[in-house]
Image: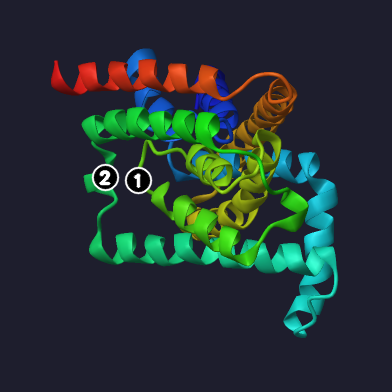
Amino acid sequence: MPILHLFLVALVQGITEFLPISSSAHLILLPMIAGLQDQGLAIDVAAHIGTLGAVVVMFWGDLRGAVAGLPRLLRGRIDSQGAWLALCLALATIPVVLAGLVIQMLDLNDDMRSVALIGWTTIIFGLLLYWADRRSPTTRTAERWRLRDAVLMGCAQAMALVPGTSRSGVTITAGRGLGYDRTDSARLSMLMSVPVIVASGVLLSLDVAAEADAGMARDMAIVAVLSFVAAFAALKLMFRLLRSVSFTPYVIYRLFLGAVLLWIAYA
């Protein structure tokens, strides 16, 4: 695969995976604008690996605690912050797993990739993010993440299986609506992404393993590295901006992007 194609896919996936602007909308626009063919499952897996690496490095302290607390949780002992975080992440992951199974069983994946649908969801959920960010007071912190809030944010994450919704966008919206500040909402959203990315990466890898060869392995390595760099830079920039800027710039961008998609769909 041409290096420019790999670079563009990695850049778009890496930047849009964690910003609340919908990666699916951008991945639909990319081949239309650049005239590129679908990159295939192998490249998708590599991009997931790269973005996962960026989150792990960025939130290593939290994730290390959750992994260390997992054995205690399995023994029924929730007596540490790590065990509590592991429990909350597990509960937050269940809704998206169940929703994914339903979509798979009903074979709805292709039906939900309509450009018009993605345009509308990009706009509607962008407006919901604006409303939650502006109207919700800050009453909680990520260190006191409640089980009820984890389940509710997990249900919001399940809605992100509809393309255009944006996984990070809808979970941040839920976090703000539940009273977490901008930084903590984004932090919880990123932590919630780890088990989801791991699960989806494993499933995709099973389909790719039988077709792998040296050329594909090289392309996957390039995309993984580039996606890692792009995702890490996007995360660092977003968290730096959240100290002084609201989510409004992302909302404005979503409105513009959604309008472009609707124009393409209905023109």
For disc 2, the neighbor class at 10 Å (few under 14, some 14 to 19, many from 20) is some
| 243 up-or-down from 147: above or below | above
In the image shown, does 221 or 253 lie closer to the viewer? Answer: 253
Compare marks 2 and 1 and give the one earlier in the sequence.
Answer: 2
Q: Where is mark 1, residue-wise? A: 162
Give the x, y percent position of residue 31: 36, 22
- Which corner quadrant of the image does residue 266 belong to? top left
Residue 132 visible from this viewpoint: yes
For disc 1, the neighbor class at 10 Å (few under 14, some 14 to 19, many from 20) is some
Q: Is residue 185 left or right of residue 13?
A: right
Q: Secondary structure at mark 1?
A: loop
Position of the C terminus by quadrant: top left
Q: Is residue 38 left or right of residue 109?
A: right
- The residue positioned 82% from the left and 47% from the top of the image is 60
| 142 up-or-down from 136: above or below | below
- Which corner quadrant of the image does residue 113 belong to? top left
Q: CA distance from mark 2 to mark 1?
A: 6 Å
- The residue positioned 57% from the left and 64% from the top of the image is 148
Tag of residue 112: 2
Q: Secondary structure at mark 2?
A: helix
Residue 22 visible from this viewpoint: no
Residue at the outermost left position:
267
- The residue positioned 72% from the left and 38% from the top of the image is 54
State if disc 1 and disc 2 touch (CB < 8 Å): yes
In the image shown, does 245 or 224 lie closer to the viewer? Answer: 245
> Residue flagged by tag 2: what amino acid is it?
Met
- The residue positioned 22% from the left and 18% from the top of the image is 264
Give the x, y percent position of residue 131: 45, 31
Give the x, y percent position of residue 7: 57, 22
Give the x, y percent position of residue 59: 78, 44
